[in-house]
Structure formats: structure tokens, C-alpha cells
Image (cartoon, rainbow, N blue to C red):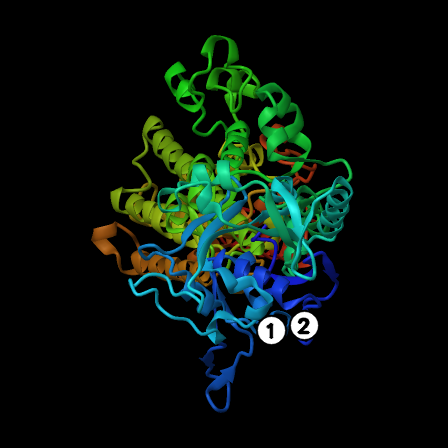
Amino acid sequence: TGTLTENRMTVVKGMFANKRHEDTADPTVPADISSKALDIILQGIATCSTARIVPAEVAHKDDDPDGLIHDTRPVLIGNKTEAALLALAVSPFGNEDDYAARRAVAQFGKSGGSRLFPFSSLRKRMSVIVNEPVGSSDASAAATPSRRRLRSNGNGGVPTTGDGKMRWTLYHKGAAESVLKNCTTYLDSDGSTKKLTAAKCAEIEATIKEYATSALRCVALCHRYDVDSIVDVTNCTVGECAEKLEKEMCLDALVGIADPLRPDVIEAVATCQKAGIFVRMVTGDNLDTAMAIAKEAGILHDDGISMIGEDFRKLTPAQLDEVLPRLQVLARSSPEDKHMLVQRLNGGLMPTTEEQWLEVHPGKDYATQKDKLLPGHMDEWALSRRGGVGEVVGVTGDGTNDGPALKAADVGLSMGISGTDVAKNASDIVIMDDNFSSIVKAVLWGRSVFDNIRKFLQFQLTVNVVALTITFLSAVCGYKPPLNAVMMLWVNLIMDTMGALALGTEPPTNDLLDRRPYKRDASLINRPMWRNILVQATYQLGLLIFLLKEAPVMFGCGDGTRHHFTIIFNAFVFCQVFNEFNAREIGDVFDPFKKLGTSPMFVVVIIFTIIAQWFIVEYGGDFTQTYPLTFEEWEITFMLGAMSIPVGYLMRLIPIDEDPESFAGIGDSMPKKKPTSSFGMLSLLIPLAAGLYQFYKEADGEGLI
């Protein structure tokens, strides 16, 4: 959820000590409950937390006249949910409570001090066992610990109040609907404790439902006194705390925390879906909260399926495969749920042997249950998919336990701000701003790199086919190879280094997001590319054969001389120069000169190639075995090479489409076929007319017509 929302959480409403407060976001409104009840709630907020708030910082900014700007918002460090509760506590609502003083009294991490069991993404809750003065929640001790008279117990231990009495109290918070099941009493507004009846429980459940459907995260706060009579606090483990202490608790408060969507999320999600990407929300939030956020973001649709992790884990592999095409929200999920979801989608890290399966399911029977328990096994998974080819999956994660899912995904995306080092190391991409729209940018650049590779292949294979074929045919027909070793080396330089620089650095365009993604087993060279390669190769090969036979007559040069072969070489190089413009598009769109201003490397490579070609021809001499050409010969060979542009237009009129089976994802979007632009038509007609005119003039001068 953190990639969709601003991660600037605020407690906007809640039920505190059995009294509803509908606008806790108003900084001027204090809590309308007794000081005793408020102190219990504030003690739980302060101690059952690892977050902290630091004062607003003074930031430097170049465009400010004084060089300084003042950010009045406090800086929240740590878990955003805990920070939201702390922000409430230090506001007028909590009488500007000093949470740091409360933590100092608790003496976490010191001998005889309080114990903290951090938040678990699996259990969706956390607990602390606090050694506190008995009077800390009495009405007479309504002041915060920083204002109380504290004294040492004489042994360097926990400070105590004047009467010297201490007690161990469990403070607990977590997902409201699950924590409520472990409560038997609730805190009333006067600070007293009352029995949690079935009617009262139903009322609280209705409040949880109300908050969740308003896209609020629901967190419950509760406590339990004198837990040292139940367990040995010093040696208590997380499991023992969960089993023996986190029950028969007193419900103190229920809060609704708002975390608004980022402004660009709705558009980003729609862009992904238009691009054929199936967006699923896997979150630890309450199902109703997750559904409300997913609907607002455009992830959950009317025909979509949403479920909780508990139900997800009960499905068999076959049942999950039936659900997957419409599963859009998985709430109250664990990192293991995310891992299994990724495995079923792409087969990543799927158990392939009995030993690997038993590592995932210790104590289970492989023979009878291998097809019944998630994530399944590789043989069963491969049979359920065409050719054993799964989806291409990208997954986000921020926690340490997300490592397996990030590793199993084809593209693991970790959170740069909220992510742990373990998650970042396990991922392929770190999203520096934790923003979903950055994932869209990653998709755009990934598709751009893929298409640029295809453009280069289309260009390179055309050169290869022509160069190899003309060399082979000349040898078979008894001619001396028209392209010598140095010429071929220069052609290879154009083909490999220059072509890669020109076509591999093309910037992405938003048009790339108007099509579905390719399957992982889709051919790298598609049908339109083969058409383009064969048509261009046919034209260039026909041109070179024509020049091989007719150039001596047309240009008045000796057959098989340097002059003859230089004309062939020059025409061939200019064919490649202009075919690079054709190669900028691998589909049916004809606009070879589009957005040249955004491709400076392409322009530089073209200019460098033409200048270098001029130097090689004019000054290569014996080294390159070239012959200086006249201006008219340069003009003709240039125009013959430029004919590759109109050929590029004509070849795109041949109706060859991409194989629909090569696309994955959702929707029916295919690469667009745009109408030919007026500029594109001019690029066809001008070289064609100029070339025909020049050819006619030269032929007439030679007396051929």
C-alpha cells in the first residue's frame, strides 16, 4: 500500500476510552475523556512504539532569497502508523504528551527494564511489557512522567514514584479486528474498566467496519496489568507473550488512520492497465480498508476478486489458478503469501524435488499432498501452463521477510525510503521515492531497451544479409569481391558500434505503453521485422548487383576497377545510413525523422558516418583501395542510398501483423498503426523524384536513352 499512498499518516477519528472522537486531526481539540483514561492510552502509545518525532528542520534551498526555508511539519522517523499515533499524543489532543520521558522511565534495553517485542508483519501486532509506577495511571498522576517527581530505587534500577510501588503492564496494539478477539474488557471514559459484552463487541466491530470502508487503517490499543504473575518477564519470549499474555486484555482505544493516495497514483495505475499490466494489491491492511483504497486507485473492479491471506492459504494450487485471473486484492497477507502468489504466477523458486517440497511443508506427505498445498511443485505447475511458461512478474517489498518474494519475482522492486537493507539487496530495482508512478517509468524504460535492441537487430541483420550475399554472388560469378577487407571493416563498424550507439540510445516514448507486454518466450525478431529485413535487403542487393553490372557504362569507369568498386561501396554505405532512419521503427508506423531532436546521439552518429565516409573515399587511397569520386557520382550514390527511405514506406504497406500469441497481460491493445504523416510522404517523394531525375540526366548524358 505504501507505493500508492503518501505515507504521511494521520489519526483522523477514533474511539478513545469508549468515547468517539470524529475529528482528531483538528490540532486544537483536546481529548474528551478523563485524565486517568487518557494517561493509560498515552502510556500505551509512547511505550508500544519504536517511532520518534523530531522538530521541524531548517532546510537550505538555492532559490530562496535568504537561503533558508522553514518546514513547519515535524519529521516522523520509523513506522508511519506508530508515528501517526505519536503525532496525536504530542498534539493538544494528548495534552502535548512527552513520550520520550515515558520511554526514559520504562528503561528499555537496561537490566530490569521494560521489554519490547517489535511489530510482526505475520501477526500484525506488537507488544511491550513495561515496568511502571503503580500510580502512573491514577487520576492523581495525570501529569506526564516528565512532570512527576521521580526517584531512583537505590539499586540503579527503574525510577519509581513516591510510594515506591512498581508493576509490570502489557501494552499491546495491532490490527483492530484481530486484537478485539483477545479483549474481554474495555476502558471507559472515566478510567474504569467494564466487561466487553457481546452487544458492545458488535458495536465496536461495526465501528471497525465503518472506518475500514472509509479507507482508514484501523488499529486497536489495549493493556493488561500485573503480567509478572503469569510469566517470568525477564525471560519471556515472543511466543510466550503471544500465548499467555496477549489475551483477556482491556481495549483502550480504536483509531482510524488516514493515508491519502498520492496525486498521480490513479493515472499511473490506469496507464499500467492500458499497457496490459495486471496490477494486484497485496497488503497487510484490513480487507475493507484494502478494498476501499484499491477501488479509489482503480485497482479493484466490479468483476475483481478480493480475499484475505487466511483464505488464500487454504486454497489448493488448482483452486488458486482459477482465482488468479481475477484476484486483484489480497489483504491481511503475510510475506509468505506474497511469495506463494509470485511462485504460482511465474514458477520462480518453485519446488522441483521431493526434498525441496518437504522443506516448505515439513511433516506432510509428498505423495498425497503435493498437488493440494501451496505453492505446489514444478511438474504440476508446468502442466497447468502452456509449455511451462509463466507470467513475467514484478513485485514490490520493503520488509526483511519480503526477500524470498523479491528473489522469486522476475523484477524485484524494493522501497528506497521505507525498505530494509535485506529487501534492497534482494531486489533488482530500488524505488528511491517509494512511488508507484516510478514503477511505470521503470516499465517504460524496460520496453524502450527491448525495442532498441530489436531496432539494432533489424538494422544489423539487413547489413549482414546484403554484405554476405553480394560477396558470395560475386565469387560465384567470377568477379573480384567489390568490398575489400578494409571496406568490410568500415561497414562492420557502421553496423556494430555506430548502429548500436545510434539505435540503442533512442529515448522512450509514451507510445510504448499503448501495447500489451510480450510473453517471456516471444520471438526477439517478429514478423514485421522479418518483412522489413527482407525487403530492405532485397532492394540493397538488387541495387548492388545492378551497379556491379551497369556502373561501368553509367559512370564511364573500368569494369572491376577501384573506381567501379568505390561507387558500389559508397552506394552501399549510404543505403545503411538511410536504413538507420527506417530502423528507428520496427512496426508499421512510417515516420523516420520523428523527434530527431530528442535523439542527439543518433544525429551525431549519422553526421560522423557521412563525414568519415567522405574522408575514406576521397583520401583513403591505397590503404582503403578507394578512388575519389566526382560531385555528380557522390550525388547519384547518395540518392540511390536515400531510396531506402521510400522503400521503407512501401514495405510497410505489406499487411503483416505481429503474432497475437506473442503478447501477454490483459486487454487487447496491439502496436498501433498510425497514418503516414505529411512529412513522411515528403520524405518518400523528394528522394524518389530527385533520384529518378538524376538517373535520367546521367543516362541521357551517356546516350543510354
Q: Position of residue 406 (x, y in %)?
A: 45, 40
| Residue for badge 1 | 95
Query: Going 26% across and 56% down the picture, which residue do you hit?
Result: 620
Query: Going 63% across and 58% down the picture, which residue do you hit?
Result: 259
Instruction: Please determine whether, in this image, residue 344 is positioned above or below residue 669.
Output: above
- Cα gap from disc 2 to disc 1, whole angstroms: 7 Å
Q: Residue furthest top?
A: 367
Instruction: Assess whether mark 1 and mark 2 are in contact (beta carbons under 8 angstroms).
Output: yes
| Near-viewer residue (451 or 161) | 161
In the rendered image, is residue 607 in sight?
Answer: yes
Query: Going 48% across and 19% down the picture, which residue do you hit?
Result: 377
Q: Is residue 556 left or right of residue 697?
A: left
Under circle 1, the secondary element is loop
Q: Position of residue 551 (x, y in %)?
A: 42, 45
Instruction: Answer with the quarter of the image where residue 654 lies.
Output: top right
Amino acid on which the number 2 mark rests in the picture: Pro
Q: Residues within 10 Å of mark 1 (few under 14, many from 20)?
A: some
Instruction: Please determine whether, in this image, residue 66 is positioned above or below residue 402.
Output: below
Q: Is residue 564 left or right of residue 532?
A: left
Amino acid on which the number 1 mark rests in the picture: Asn
Q: Is residue 451 left or right of residue 280?
A: left
| Residue for badge 2 | 30
| Near-viewer residue (236 or 13) | 236
**How many badges with numbers are in the image?**
2
Under circle 2, the secondary element is loop
- Of label 2 and label 1, which has the lower sequence position? 2
In the rendered image, is residue 659 in sight?
Answer: no
Query: Going 58% across and 31% down the picture, which residue do you hit?
Result: 662
Badge number at residue 643: none
Q: Position of residue 263 (x, y in %)?
A: 65, 62
